[in-house]
Amino acid sequence: MDFCHKRFLVLGLKKTGISVINFLKTLNPIKIYITDKNLKLEIPDTVYIDYEEAFICLDKIDYLIKSPGIPYDIPLLEEARKKNVTIINDIELSYPFIKNDKKIIGVTGSNGKTTTTTLIERLLSEGKIKALSAGNIGKPLLEVVTTKNSEVDVYVLELSSFQLLDLYDFKADINIFLNINLAHLDYHHSFEHYLNAKLNLVKNIDADSIIIYNYDDVSLTERLKGKQGKHFTFSLSNPDATTYINDGKIIFNNEVIMNVSDIKLLGKHNLYNIMPCIIVGKIFNITNETIRKALTSISGLPHRLEYVRTINEISFYNDSKSTNPTSTLNALAAFNKPIILLLGGYDRGQDFVEVIKHPNIKHIIAFGATNERICKETENHNVPYTKCDNLEEAVIVAYQLAKPHDIVLLSPASASWDAFSDYEERGCIYKHLINNLPNITI
Ligand code: ADP
């Protein structure tokens, strides 16, 4: 696609939208219209159009560039499609500006994208390869492409299904599929639509493309196994996969790479994140020793089963990134000690029953907007619980209840928007509260 000297409408004016506008300005544009349902901004060299009136400029533009989180089926976009306006996102816009000598690794999946993207970036860097992560990880690709291009050999892109929907020419050299489960159905409406969005990552692959996927994930394996390209797979136990685990060791093509017991990241789910990284390491000819060193030295990412502190032999963990019950179930399964779980937050009607019934739970502390609902369920299932109004109270109650060798875990299975701006703020406040607890049993 050619983006020079064209007319654009930028839909969505937060971080990604702003990076898009700044970039478009460098392309000698004829016109940049901008709009947002909730924000009215004056930006030099652009024309703001009220969201309700943005329909009128559809006849005057070549490209509509949409921020990924905006639903694909809003009336403005439906109308744009009718008028054959090309709708793209920042990833597609960046693509022609990534030089041919750079490699692109695309990482997608329902869970584990940020973890795997971060691990790959660190592994490649440890192997003396100049790698940089971007995309859904919170670093718009455009910002990185414009400022760091000369310093980068490999872009490691975290790609959400929202970003994958609007791709045309984009092609990654290595395409990683971690897993797929029922997520984001509020956005995609059906599993098939969601799966197809993910598979868009490989719509332009050729015989030289590399696909790495989870062999234990039936939906992914079924849809990917017939695709062209070089295939690498990973599995917890299936020896038919390129990488699998046998007798506590991770094997790549019959070669032992590392012991599972050396990995500091907690939980079985993280083995699923480590294995594709090993495959990437081998593809880039990084030595086993460096792969081992890089992947076993990381003990946790912020807000993802992050160890905070131990007081009186009670260990505190922050898993604020857990915004759905599946994530919390992963977190609960990562420990074999009694857990006092801080559960609750923004109410999306999520079903807490499986979480509440988890055998590792000693006590549930229900807080946030879902606290009433959680208390009702815990009562139905005879699980001990305490209702708290907020996180502060929840931390104090947890500390009062905890005995030596217990785990206190914030893994709310809920988004944070009932009381916080995002999961990071919630996690930081939790850590602050924990770090200020007195070092004596209350
Ligand atoms: P994403 O970027 O896809 O949202 P993260 O790496 O931020 O994923 O991890 C978010 C949460 O998802 C983690 O706290 C963990 O509970 C869960 N998770 C991480 N990796 C996996 C995986 N491979 N399979 C299932 N759940 C996972």
Image (spheres, rainbow, N blue to C red):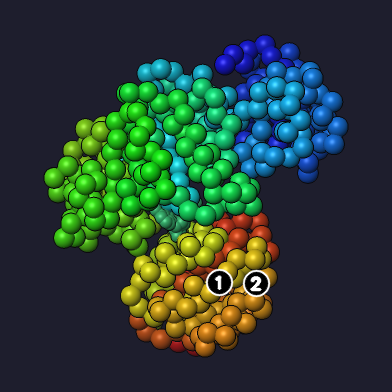
- Circle 2 Cα neighbour tier, 10 Å, few/some/many (<14 / 14–19 / ≥20): many
Quadrant of res 83: top right
Is label 2 or label 1 in front?
1
Rendered residue at 60%/66% (across/down) = 350
The residue that label 2 is drawn on is 370
Q: Quadrant of residue 59?
A: top right
Q: Which amino acid does label 1 sit on?
A: Phe
Q: In which quarter of the image is ligand 1?
A: bottom left
Q: In which quarter of the image is the N terminus?
A: top right
Query: CB of residue at label 2: within 8 Å of ligand 1?
Result: no
Name which of mark 2 and mark 1 comes first in the sequence. 1
Residue 407 against residue 177 in the figure, above or below: below
Q: Can residue 351 be seen here?
A: yes
Q: What element carries label 1?
A: loop
Direction from residue 423 to residue 255 in the image, left or right: left
x and y, in percent, of residue 260 in the image: 23, 58
Q: Where is residue 250 in the image (x, y as percent from the top left)?
A: 20, 52
